[in-house]
């Protein structure tokens, strides 16, 4: 990854046009070929960017600021960076990222629920665990008793962030005609009241999981039948 802090202006030329006036900014050039321009706010969201595949051409202009042209290899759209001053320029080899690791309980919950998918309801069948999407893997993708697709997000403790995460997965999965319509199940050992309200408002089913029961361990408390 290359990190460049520079005083620059940025022009996007394509289906739409956009202009960022001259100011100090962070330019990220990643190994996958993506280029993004960031300010010192807005959390992770860039001001402008170009997704791969794209090429970067740097031109030194005599008696003027340098010009970097980022061209998308397929669409031909461009980012034009006018570099007035470079304050920092460094490259770092990050290597292959191992990805997000769930804690032991969440990982085991996923494994157990996939093995006992009928916990969610009669007739449920597993499609696969860690179903890949462009924004990350869905914990479990399955079908209900009527063969409708269901996306399951698993948490040890379910809060609003988990519901938002599942909502993003559902929006993406429902664009795939081979899967749509896709409904959601938010499953956890404990679900906070605010998360339950938000989930139900979005048509997402909440399921509280008993970890010991999934593992086949009988509870210590007596039950009345």
Image (cartoon, rainbow, N blue to C red):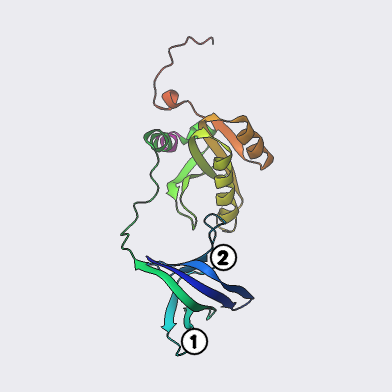
Image location (x, y in percent) of residue 166:
56, 45
Q: Which residues are magenta?
A: 112-116
115 drawn magenta: yes
From this viewpoint, is residue 84 visible? Answer: yes
Split into 4 quadrants, where in the image is the C terminus?
Answer: top right
79 falls in the magenta region:
no
Specify whether 195 is left or right of 116: right
Tell which residue pokes out farthest to the bottom in this image. Answer: 62
Evaluate whether residue 149 shows in this view. Answer: no
The disc placed on residue 47 is 2
Q: Nearer the viewer, residue 168 or 87?
A: 87
| Quarter occupied by residue 58 | bottom left
- The one nearer the camera, 35 or 198, is 35
Q: CA distance from mark 2 to mark 1?
A: 24 Å
Is residue 72 depicted above or below 182 in this figure?
A: below
Residue 64: which numbered mark, if any?
1
- Is tag 2's residue or tag 1's residue first in the polypeptide sequence? 2
- Of the two numbered discs 2 and 1 in the rendering, the one whose residue sits closer to the viewer: 1
């Amino acid at each position: 990854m290359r990190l460049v802090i520079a005083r620059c202006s940025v022009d996007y030329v394509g289906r739409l046009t956009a202009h960022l006036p001259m100011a100090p900014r962070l330019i990220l050039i990643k190994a996958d070929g993506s280029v993004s321009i960031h300010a010192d706010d807005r959390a992770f969201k860039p001001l402008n960017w170009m997704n791969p595949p794209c090429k970067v051409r740097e031109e030194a202009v005599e008696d003027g600021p340098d010009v970097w042209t980022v061209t998308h290899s397929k669409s031909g759209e461009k980012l034009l960076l006018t570099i007035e001053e470079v304050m920092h320029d460094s490259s770092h080899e990050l290597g292959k990222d191992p990805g997000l690791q769930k804690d032991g309980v969440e990982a085991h919950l996923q494994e157990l629920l996939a093995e006992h998918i009928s916990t969610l309801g009669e007739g449920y069948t597993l499609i696969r665990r860690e179903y890949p999407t462009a924004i990350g893997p869905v914990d479990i993708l399955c079908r209900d008793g009527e063969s409708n697709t269901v996306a399951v997000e698993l948490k040890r403790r379910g809060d609003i962030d988990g519901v938002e995460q599942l909502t993003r997965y559902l929006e993406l999965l429902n664009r795939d005609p081979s899967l749509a319509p896709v409904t959601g199940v938010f499953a956890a050992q404990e679900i906070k009241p605010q998360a339950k309200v938000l989930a139900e408002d979005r048509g997402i089913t909440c399921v509280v999981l008993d970890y010991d029961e999934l593992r086949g361990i009988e509870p210590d408390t007596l039950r009345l039948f």
